Amino acid sequence: MAENTDNLFSMSLEELLNIEVETQKVPESFQKVPVSSTLYTHEQIANSHIVDIYDLAEFVPNFSFRPSFGKLLERGVTRGVANITGNNVTGIFIDGLSFSNVVSSISLQDFKYVEVIRGPQATLYGRDTFAGAVNLVSKDPLVNISKELSVTVSDQGFSALTASYGKQYSDSFGIQINLKHKQNAGDYNNETGDGGGNLNQREHQYGHLALSYSMGDFKWRTNAYIFADKDSSFPTVMQSAVQNNCYLETRRQYYCGILNQPKSQGQNNTWLNGQGGLWKDAHLLTSIMNLQLSQQHDVSFNFGLLDNKMSYFVDGDYSDYSFSWIDVENAMQTKEADFKLHSVWNKSLETIIGYTHYEQDTKSKIQSFLDFSGTVSPASDSSSISNVNYSALYVRASYKLSQAQDIILDLRLSQDEIGFVATENSGIKDFNDNKSKITYRHELHTNNFWYISLGEGNKPGGFNVNLYDKEFTDSLDAELVRSYQSFDQEKLWQLESGYKGLSADKSISTKLSAFYTHWQDLQTSQSITFKLANDSVKTESVIANNGKSKNYGIETELIWMPSELTKVWLSYGWVKTSLSEASTAAQFELLGDGDVSGNVVPNVPEHTLAVGINNQFQYNKWSVSPFASFHYESQRFVAEHNLAIVDDISKLRIGINAQRSHWEFSMFAELAQNNGYIESAARLGDPLTFFRLRSFGLTLADKNRFYTRLSYTF
């Protein structure tokens, strides 16, 4: 293990809560940050066997992150604000830089800490923080190093091998290298498909190099990451439109009620030689430089580069024909730089002035194929280039009104330029925004305060590239298509009030927060039908601004440490969403058979709960740490119509860690109430009938597993 500078059982609760973080881009105690957030340190992550973002989400109130079609459509849901469609709304940051596209490939155990921040964070973190942000902060090899070999195996054909080596060559230079290889033999047999084999086979390779240099008032740290993912056919089952059980007289038939896990799974991948699945290769470089100019002023410069290539092939088994598509071959390059001047003018006034620039270029190629009785024929072939240029100036001022009161004002002025090139068409659109947040904090007494804040957020708009390059003879059809060629940004504002406190005997930590969100101009999926110049009728799926929602809820996190060796904790989140003024083409067709417009935002669990206990005791010369936790997410609707439902999820995580000298041995299990439950569902359409018969892509969870881990620390 790494040096135990943040070990739960070597620190008091007060020390644990006062770990220094930079949630608001200034160093401060986590306990004093006036925002609803959850922090997990490196040691807490290791002790709880949290590996990735999916594991972490199960511990955090009002935060959900579920796989959808493997790693293709996964998106975070925070406080009821979800991606109905379009860009991510919960941004993933590495050392303050936005790199959401690689989060599923990153091992969280290599970071100093991970913080989930709830509520819009546009003023400090920028784009893609509409609902919240997850910030991963890397370890400094001058402070934390590890020299370790470990192997993990499970009863379901899962194995992982990790190696780490760190060295501090002097007081000014340190290095850390982490390597990982893990694979999953597959949870489901390909029982009904033609290709045989297993579904959900995964192979992951990961490399991380960290360098740290310090000289006087100058500090520099850089991290290089390499990821390689190779997944077989996804554990996704197409529930045929034949199984629809309501609104059968309409052309858009649906399934009503709780979606059930099928008894058998299969993919028709014979002609693909079993090559369905996902391939991803990514290279990420981040660098952080800090310079103390004087006792009052310091500057920092962060920059990052990401080269991400991905391709995936999905086979659809929900038609009389074996429709298959390879979608997409993506090549994405992202660059980001952030400059910040931090000043402490006196005991009352502290400011930040910063500038951020972000660029992303994506090349996409989509090919579709139809398989008619074993004869594969191309159905469509398209390619496009999209780009994002984002620049922002941000300012933060914190002013102490008195010894117990302060007020914080955040402001960001930004320009988001989004463009595309496809075939012979191109487009570009600017979104200029001013976002602000104001926070009032009042300290009741030592380690206890309450706060109230009002902040704004926005989600960028964009283009429906599939509506370009069309020819019409009817002016009404032409006008219809033009009106949907682009869509505007979503906007929200959120009012939040909360309390953070530590009991007089410093054994109980309490965090409470309540919020109200006004969310408008939602980006939803629509279907439009029109006639082309050749008299053919075309139906296209598009993104359009449609509807609003009012969300409100609470979250609480409690920690009780009756002794230095026992920790009992609870996190609970409740959110109520109220979707209104939203409609789709399918909804209009269904209204005649009943009001199914729905009033709940899809993919949002109303309740999230996690409760657990960690303990430590000595047995002979072994330090033994048993742990157990229960995790729950309530039901979620699949789409705006609130017809199909993904059932609730209950899971038990239980295990024991034993450490002696250089050795550590662990046994733990992940046990779901419904083994192989449905993680998520995506509404799909049968391409042979122009999206008129509805199907569902059901993403199945990993099967229950029992793990054994052995590690040796040098």
Image (cartoon, rainbow, N blue to C red):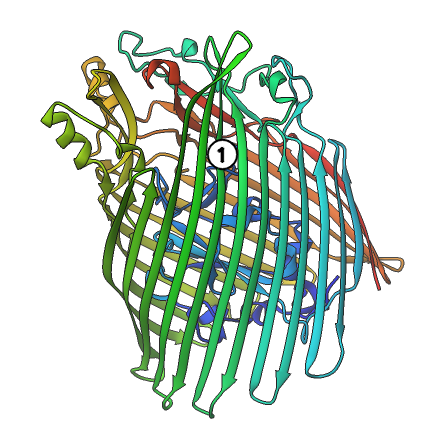
Q: Is residue 673 above or below residue 420?
A: above
Between 296 and 466, the one lying in front of the other is: 466
Between 286 and 184, the one lying in front of the other is: 286
Residue lying at 46% horizontally and 8% vertically, measured from the top left: 320
Q: Is residue 507 left or right of residue 65?
A: right
Name the quadrant containing residue 129.
Answer: bottom left
Q: Is residue 189 visible?
A: yes
> Which residue ends up furthest to the right in the rendered image?
620
| Quadrant of the frame with the N terminus | bottom right
Residue lying at 30% horizontally and 40% vertically, measured from the top left: 577
Picture coordinates of residue 509 (x, y %)? 51, 63
Picture coordinates of residue 448 (x, y %)? 43, 71
Between 214 and 375, the one lying in front of the other is: 375
Picture coordinates of residue 652 (x, y %)? 62, 38
- Residue placed under numbered mark 1 in the picture: 68
Residue lying at 46% horizontally and 37% vertically, measured from the top left: 73
Q: Is residue 460 left or right of residue 192?
A: left
Q: Is residue 33 above or below residue 92?
A: below
Q: Is residue 54 left or right of residue 241?
A: right
Q: Is residue 258 visible?
A: no
| Quadrant of the frame with the C terminus | bottom right
Local crowd size for mark 1, using a 10 Å CA cut-off: few (<14), some (14–19), many (≥20): many
| SS state under label 1 | loop
Q: Is residue 662 above or below residue 325?
A: below
> Which residue ends up furthest to the left in the rendered image?
475
Residue lying at 75% horizontally and 65% vertically, measured from the top left: 146
Between 85 and 409, the one lying in front of the other is: 85
Q: Is residue 692 above or below residue 214?
A: above
Amino acid type at mark 1: Ser
Picture coordinates of residue 326 (x, y %)? 50, 29
